[in-house]
Amino acid sequence: MASQPRQIFILTGAGISAESGLGTFRDRGGLWARFDPMKLATPEAFAEDPDTVLDFYNHRRRGVRKAAPNAAHAALARAEAALAARGGRLFLCTQNVDDLHERAGSAAVVHMHGELLKARCTACGTVSERRADILPDDPCPHCGAAALRPDVVWFGEMPKHLDRIDAALAESDLFVAIGTSGAVYPAAGYVREARALGIRTCELNLEPSDNAGAFDEARYGPASTIVPGYLT
Ligand code: BJW
């Protein structure tokens, strides 16, 4: 990094977990290249065909449990601790629904698109830890209703923690987007919001994203190489 920022806002996407074996969405062979997101990742799809949607997420939940964090996740956890020791803060906002940042040692992770290893009851709203498959008749541990869904954010739903995210972005002096295509809003708009606030911006990605032209600087390559290189 050029100078020593004190408040870093990191936005991560599926690309940071790609080398851990978890598929991205929009790359060639990615999830949304093989499956129609409108049939799997919308509240309407779940209402229409809950079994198919639960199967899709159960399969991915098993994949997350088997995956391990890579060097990029580990570098972010180290950077968070090092910055805190200098009196600064690294705010880690992820679009990812996996738990690889937590398992790499990041202390505070904001999951704006929810978490695959949690379930939410559509009857009472209770969110519970859920490592096992969700089956259609499984009861909610709180109210007993057979109304569990993955606690992830589908298209047309409001992302989580937006107030905290906006506040952290406004306080930052560096914005870094890692492994995200810049295709999904509101996250895709953060680089322009940062620029408007006078915050320096950097993209770390395998290749230029849809938003590449909006960043002040960029480094391209696999996350496991470029993220540790950038942060040290
Ligand atoms: C590597 C690598 C390696 C690969 N190393 N890099 C304008 C404004 C606001 C909203 C909209 C708008 N226009 C349309 C909308 C609505 C919609 C939207 O954005 N649609 C677009 C398709 C246009 N947005 C929504 O519906 C959101 N809600 C919403 O807007 O609410 C209203 C609102 C209004 C105003 C303010 C605030 C809110 C909700 C979006 C929910 C997204 N859900 C998903 C599924 C989650 C559950 C699940 O996992 O199944 O979230 S879709 C999917 O995309 C997932 C991801 O988090 C998200 C982003 O994908 P990501 O992470 O960028 O992955 P990829 O695959 O796209 O990119 C990977 C990148 O990595 C690539 O660039 C590779 O090159 C790179 N890479 N290998 C480094 N080794």
Image: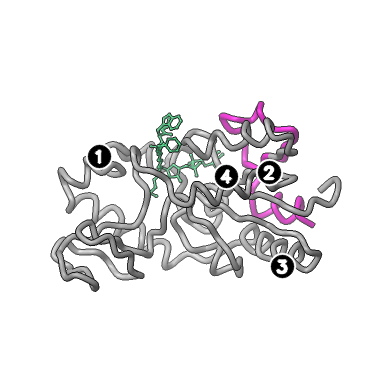
Q: Indicate which disc, 1 or 3, sits on the residue closer to the N terminus.
A: 1
Q: Amino acid at mark 4?
A: Asp
- Classify 10 Å Cα crowding around label 2: few (below 14), some (14-19), many (20 and above): many
Which residue in the protein does label 2 denote? 175
In space, the residues marked 4 and 2 are separated at their CA atoms by 12 Å
- Label 3 residue near ligand 1, CB within 8 Å: no
133 in relation to 168, above or below: below
Which residue in the protein does label 3 denote? 81
Magenta span includes 66: no
> Where is residue 126 shown, x and y percent of the image?
29, 64
- Classify 10 Å Cα crowding around label 4: few (below 14), some (14-19), many (20 and above): few
Which residue in the protein does label 4 denote? 166
- Classify 10 Å Cα crowding around label 1: few (below 14), some (14-19), many (20 and above): some
In space, the residues marked 1 and 3 are separated at their CA atoms by 41 Å
Q: Quadrant of residue 26?
A: top left
The part of the chain drawn in magenta is: 203-232
Q: Indicate which disc, 2 or 3, sits on the residue closer to the N terminus.
A: 3
Which residue in the protein does label 1 denote? 39
Q: Amino acid at mark 3?
A: Ala
Give the camera-side residue of 148 and 58: 148
In space, the residues marked 4 and 1 are separated at their CA atoms by 31 Å
Q: Amino acid at mark 2?
A: Phe
In the image, what residue occupies the spot 42% across and 62% down? 64
In the image, what residue occupies the spot 76% across and 65% down? 82
In the image, what residue occupies the spot 70% across and 47% down? 172
